[in-house]
Image: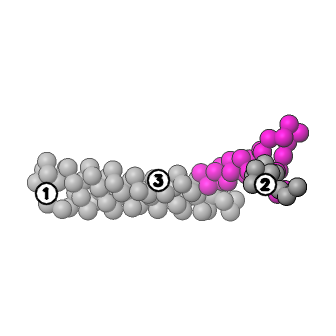
Amino acid sequence: MPPSENDEQNEPDPGAARTSDGGLLGPATQFQRNLRKSAPAAAASYTLIGGIVLLGGLGYFADGWFGTGPWLLLLGLLMGILVGFYELVRLVWGRHR
């Protein structure tokens, strides 16, 4: 009797790690491990983007409030960039310890 499509779909993946109860924990565990490893880099990138947006936005509104032109906006953007790159440097140099 030739195999049907249902037989091919129900065959287990030979490369998948299985637990004693037949579950597929290998891919899920690997995914969690990769998320944990990438968390510091994600946090540093969020800090860079968030610092630029938040401090730039505060500078923009402060310029409107005080009528100082683009100077407080530029100062806020510069401070956001500095804070973001500080986090990136801290992340990179922190791994070499």
For discs 3 and 1, the disc positioned in front in the rendered view? 3
Which image quarter holds the C terminus?
Answer: bottom right
37 horizontally vs 50: left or right: right
- Distance of mark 2 from mark 1, alpha carbons? 75 Å
For discs 2 and 1, the disc positioned in front in the rendered view? 2
34 horizontally vs 19: left or right: left
The residue labelled by disc 1 is 68
The residue most toward the left is: 67
| Secondary structure at numbered mark 3 | helix
| Dot 2 and dot 3 residues touching (CB under 8 Å) | no
The residue labelled by disc 2 is 4
Q: Which amino acid does label 2 sit on?
A: Ser
The residue labelled by disc 3 is 46
Is 51 in front, or is 93?
A: 51
Q: Residue sitting at 84 percent across and 40 percent down?
A: 22
Is 78 in front, or is 49?
A: 49
Residue 96 position, x and y percent, is 68, 62
Q: Residue sitting at 31 percent across and 60 percent down?
A: 77
